[in-house]
Amino acid sequence: MIGNRKRLSSGLSVTSKVFVRSRNGGAQKIVREHYLRDDIPCYSKACKVCHDIIKTDAAGELPRFILSENPSKTKSGLRHYIVVDTNIILHAIDLLENVSCFYDVIVPQTVLEEVKNRSFPIYQRLRGLVKSEDKRFIVFHNEYAEATYITRNKNESINDRNDRAIRKVASWFGTHMKTNHSENDIGIIFICNDADNRQKARAEKIDARSLVEYFDDLPNGEDLRDLIPSDINSGVDFHNENEASFPEYYSNSRIMAGVKNGTLYQGMLNISSYNFLQGTVQVPAFRKPLLIVGSQNLNRAFNSDSVIVELLPKDKWREPSTTIVEESNIGSNDNANDEDEEDVGSAGSGVVSDKERILLAQEALKATSSSAGVQKRLQPTARVVGIMRRSWRYYVGQIAPSSVSSDDTGNASKSCFVILMDKVLPKIRIRTRKAKEFLGQRIVVVVDSWPADSRYPNGHFVRTLGEIESAEAETEALLLEHDVEYRPFSKNVLDCLPEEGDNWVVPDLVNTDDPKLKKRVDLRDKLVCSIDPPNCVDIDDALHAKPLPNGNYEVGVHIADVTHFVKPNTALDQEGASRGTSVYLVDKRIDMLPMLLGTNLCSLKPYVDRFAFSVIWELDDNANIVKVEYMKSVIKSREAFSYERAQTRIDDKSQTDELTESMRILLKLSKKLKQQRLDAGALNLASPEVKVHMDSETSDPNEVEIKKLLETNSLVEEFMLLANISVARKIYDSYPQTAMLRRHAPPPATNFEQLNDMLSVRKPGLSISLESSRALADSLDRCEDPQDPYFNTLLRIMSTRCMMAAEYFSSGSYGYPEFRHYGLAVDIYTHFTSPIRRYCDVVAHRQLAGAIGYENLDLSHRDKNKMETIVKNINRRHRSAQFAGRASIEYYVGQVMKNNEAEHEGYVIKCFNNGIVVLVPKFGIEGLIKLEMLGDVNTAIYDEDKYELKFTDLQGKERRVAVFDKVNVDVKSVKDEVSGNRKAQLLLR
Amino acid sequence: MILSPAERSYLYDSLAQSPPIRPDSRSDHQFRPLEAKTAFLPGSNGSARIRLMDGSECIISVKAKVVLASQESSLIECDIDIAGFRDDSNFVSNLKFYLTNLLLHNFPVRYLKLTSRYAFKLFLDCIVVSHSSYPLSLISLTSYLALKTTRLPLLVSDVNDEEIAEQPTFSDDWDNAKYIDDYLKEGETFEPPIFITLGVIGPNLIIDPSTEEEQVLENGLIISFYNNNVITPISNINLATNSNNSNFKGLNRTLITKGIALGNKYCPAIISALNTLIEQDDEEGTIF
């Protein structure tokens, strides 16, 4: 409104914008001054005038001209630049990234900002495109350019205004290109999928086209057409009539108010891995998660979406389903599993006032508190009424064969279903012309939308990974599925590495002007060695020990000095921070930092000088710390041992050299440390860890074994724990608000409820006590079944699943008592010892360097909010790395089993009314056996109190199976033709 | 004392004549000329500034905030700041009381209600940059202009939140913000209440006495006017607050009736003059 421009000086004028900010129910009038300039160039190399108007930026550099003077042509021979509209970027970012189209693209600033507000991940990908320059993307700051800035008209919606601003850019470029370079005629094509906007643009004499129209005019357009996302594929209407109707989501204003007054709850949806129609949402208001049952109540939410839920009336509360439900095959279009059809009407009808809801919430609170007696299994249920943030990403799946009709010929695109690898997600409908070609391949799809009247979400094809069960496709698929960044490091990341590359050596310590180098301590005379798994290339840690004259011992832990190379706020640091951790797959390692650092410059290789961060203790004979020092140092490792070689050398009595002696000291002390830890109540839990042996020649997996632990494993582990604890204390001391720490919360009693209940029913006399980690550890030791030596391990595996996950945090977020690491039974803990493969350790290194006055700590590690972001990301990455690793093992175990069908021992760990879950320790796999495979479905009786399933088996004999039972199972690996996943198929003997 | 005894006597005699002869040759019902500007504070919902010819000047900004109506004792709050006076002085608190009290009782507050729970609360911040005569009518006229030009953002969320709470959301376009006048029913007009000051001298009443006139007045009357009628409160006051007035005496009650008649006769003209002023005020103009 106060839109008049005032000239401040030549080339700069000011205007102001007025708008209302309606946040948290407020209505604030905001006035912003807005400055316009006349020196923003068009960035076209063909332009003759813009070179004269540009000015240097603050760093004294001139803007670079990116757009080619000879851009690509359309079929009709038009050389053109492209101006894109926001909806194109939001829906077709994959196409923009595609190497076969979209060069010389102008992104108006208005578009960039709209993209940023709508989807941050897409915004970042767009920024990546602009930054890399290989596809010649530019951002034109039209909002700051005098020639292209427009003010909002009266009664014009902000979207209309922005559309007009974008059209203004297109028309400005059009005239600019025409007037300023006569020799090669460059046209401007405005691509926009909003028909109305296109029409307006054409009225303004802009060459406006839809994506389809544009591709039709490209020489390679035919191949590209399939990649056009579904929801902007013009003229194509997906949904069948009245196929389904989901309740509409609540309006934002209602959600905000509801969350505030405690009638709606926000939380992360967690779909049960056994029943894709049942999910839980943990909300802070209740102790137990809220149950969400049925597709209507799930209301189009995906697993791990951030959702808003509303409690259902008390008569709809129920026990968690004990039935296994997997999405049935396409074609058998029954939704019989949808148990809540009758709920649908009532859920929507009738207004429930807030007062009633608050009463309901109190009921729910009572029901979820553990003391509730009779109805203790009754759980409050809820339904999804809004989605705050979608977890949509790339999904890997395969086309459902039954959804592609075989008589389908011709080139028209047909819709078909994609079954995702992730079982908890619904199938996705895509439209493609190459459905048949893609059959039997792993393909990547994205979800575009899920309208209320469609039973399935709509998506589009992105690319194919290759044949199902080829190692490359499966590896890439699981990396994608777990959101692991596996692309090679970009150029600007690699630019941060030392120029010398592999030839880098430790500089001369004595004759140097570098004050930091002078602060380094020369520890090259210490007898340092490293002990790692065989063939380890990224050696994070090395150790030394020697007796002191006073009878104590000097022990040093030396950690690779990664932060010497990874400086804060560099591209390298950002890449490391976003990857968060290295990911270890059976046949592959995805590094957090570039190879050069991980396997050479930082790696504490033997026989060469390396920078290290050292922690040196004086320990007395009982491994108590007398004093501790931290220093940046230079070391020279004498030897890199494998666990086995170190063990042999220690055990070999004939070896009496100093290095071996020092390892013996380490071993002796480590045993004492371990005993101290166990006495304090450290847990010894188990997970069925297995290792896959690869055939060294063909690198085919051919054997699976359970990991063995040697004494030397625990030698290294104990000192790493000691270093981590010492460093945690030190950095917490120096940075009480932002120290990077790791905690492990004690498990809530409710987690063990079911397990203890199972124990009391199935193994009377045994129980797990939860008062403290010590009590838990002791009670686990007591839980022995004299007939079954494996029972104790089984119980440990099951207990592990009841535990909370350890997490990184910055010390300001919790009070000191909550820092406790339950599993290790220490009051404070961090990760310091593997900076090559974990970002937490990098931060801990920087904080320790700051704490000992080696260098100033970067602001990002002193700022609470920034630390929060870092912590959140590395927790997430850590988790997905673990899952990816496990999935990789699972895949290879499946491949091994393919050739080794046999009978094995298994244990029942879960019982449902239509199936059981059996764990096979030999392979560390667990599998579901459905009732149909066990015996006669009609005879089955499930005794819920006893966790026992009674049925008549296929031989006609009556059989009972209960939790903890040892059973013999046939293990074989079968491929699920629908999802393409290979999984262990178990058959009860 | 800004006048000598001779001047006082001369001034008294001329004002007590019938008709009174005022030193600036105004007639008894004439206001001093003023200049005004409205809606010039970009960050406020409404604003106005009035400057009198003697250099007195007042600026008022109106800001609206969304509140839970149940938690507020009133939906209008005024704050007055007068150059040269402490905020807790009697002078300032009296003025503040006058203005707040007048607005609280004579304002269509129901139109500030957004939903059953939420309402706009108006905050009037008033600065008297300088003044010579008693500033109440100056403040009051400025508040009239400021309130008239106050715009409230347009509610776009559901109005009915009795049963199910809903957080109010507003159109982000400032151009959609509506004047309070726009919320009123057909036939109603939004004209906030005003105060005028009358000087009592002999048998005469003079509107808007200047500083010099205040020195010789026998009494002062404050009359409030709303909805085309003089309303309560009507009070009398010694307008010459910064000097002792030896002429000051009791009030003849016939003069009250006369004052009310005067108010009823001339206040509509003041209101319509102010309304015309708002109409003629163009947004692009300079601030004097």
Image (cartoon, coloured by chain):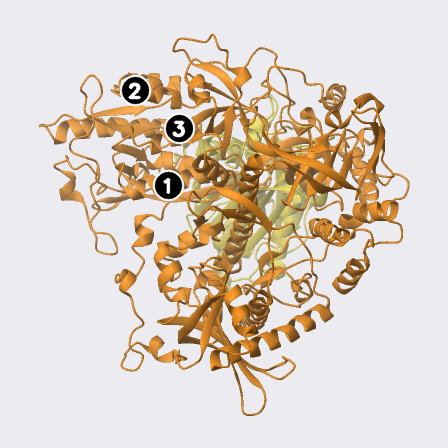
Q: Which chain is orange?
A: A
For mark 3, give the secondary structure: helix
Mark 2: amino acid: Gly
Left or right of residue B3: residue B76: right
Going by the picture, which residue comes out furthest to the right?
Answer: A374
Judging by the rendered image, the residue that carries numbered circle 2 is: A221
Query: Quadrant of the image for the N terminus of chain A?
Result: top left
Instruction: Determine whether A847 is above or below B252 in the image.
Output: below
| Most foreground residue, A201 or A458 | A458
Specify which label sits upstream in the sequence, 3 or 2. 3
For mark 1, give the secondary structure: strand
Which tag is nearer the camera, tag 1 or tag 2?
2
Specify which label sits upstream in the sequence, 3 or 1. 1
Judging by the rendered image, the residue that carries numbered circle 1 is: A16
Image x and y of residue A166, in percent: 33, 29
Q: From mark 3 to mark 1, how far is it between C-alphas?
A: 34 Å
Binning the other alpha carbons within 10 Å of mark 3 as few (below 14), some (14 to 19) or many (20 upward) gives many
Instruction: Determine whether A372 is above or below B4 in the image.
Output: above
Image x and y of residue A59, in percent: 25, 56
Q: From mark 3 to mark 2, how far is it between C-alphas?
A: 15 Å
Left or right of residue A655: residue A599: left
Left or right of residue A557: residue A93: left
Q: Is residue A237 visible from the viewing direction of this image? A: yes
